[in-house]
Image (cartoon, grey):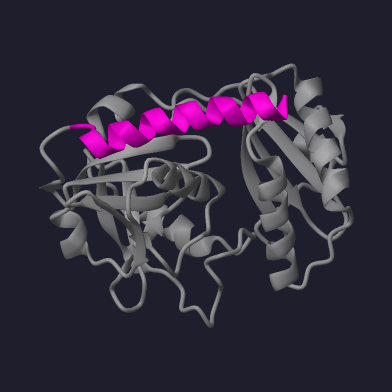
Amino acid sequence: MNASKPEVKIFVNGQPVSSPKQYPLPTESSNFVFESLRSYNGIIFRLKEHLKRLSESAKTIHLKLPKSAHQLELEVKSCLSESSQTEAFIRISVDETNSYVLVTERTRPEWIYEKGINLKTAVMRKNMPNAVPSEIKTSAFLTNVLAVLESPEEDMDEVILLDPNGFVTESTVWNLFMVKEYQIFTAATGILHGVTRQFVIECIQLERLPIIQTNLTRHDLWNADEAFLTNTSGEIVPIRMLDGRRIGSKMPGDMTQRLMARFQKELKQELRNDS
């Protein structure tokens, strides 16, 4: 779902790095927490909320962060400014010693918003709640990686993951919503509590639409009127098909279009307030 690879700028403890080999960047064997951010015209969307979740992830895995949330906030803003990019995708990773900021571009092709994307159910299942919590973003991201590595079908764009009981949770890097009879549903447990997911829930409430957080099955999704995914870099993306079954008759659906419009309206207002 991504276009060609753009330029990537890397910073370690706020200092630019000409080559990743100069510093011990986080690897699969290190213990770190991370967040993915997006900037619009140089303003980072809900940076404080992302850093709050970063701190919560660190607390859960008993990782003592080397810097305060305020220090990390200033550092991320400084790195974005030094990168000379205004419309950027930003990844911050923090271990017990250092902070690492990656600034690049991540754009989604326009067709996904107009035609929707196709999903299939992954064979891989989400972890039990008493194993690795779904609420944290750490280097222990193996379940989602394995789901991505499953042999893709030619017309498949993403996968969804079920929990051990067979309930729908989320996609690999997206939260999931569905619409049925003018009500909007999303999974309640076994998910990352996405910052953009929360923003979309606020948009739903501003539209005075019912939002229900509950257990969902694939049967529910296959028979939904509409469905869509949300995350920071992609905002709201309609789902066209799941497991070869068409969802809804219009792409994007009326409710999805309504929320996409509300999203942009509230986003502009929030960015204006943060400028």
Q: Nearer the viewer, residue 111 or 10?
A: 111
Residue positioned 86% across, 50% down in the render: 98
At which x and y percent is residue 134?
52, 67
Within the image, what quadrant is residue 131 found in?
A: bottom right
| 94 to the left or right of 114 | right
Is 130 rendered above or below residue 65?
A: below
- Magenta segment includes 271: yes
| 253 to the left or right of 136 | left
Asked whether residue 8 is in view, the answer is: no
- Magenta segment includes 245: no
| 234 to the left or right of 273 | left
Q: Nearer the viewer, residue 142 or 109?
A: 109
The outermost residue toward the bottom is: 130
Asked whether residue 137 is in view, the answer is: yes
Is 267 rendered above or below residue 68?
A: above
| 37 to the left or right of 106 | right
Within the image, what quadrant is residue 75 found in?
A: top right
Query: Over which residues does the magenta segment extend?
Result: 251-275
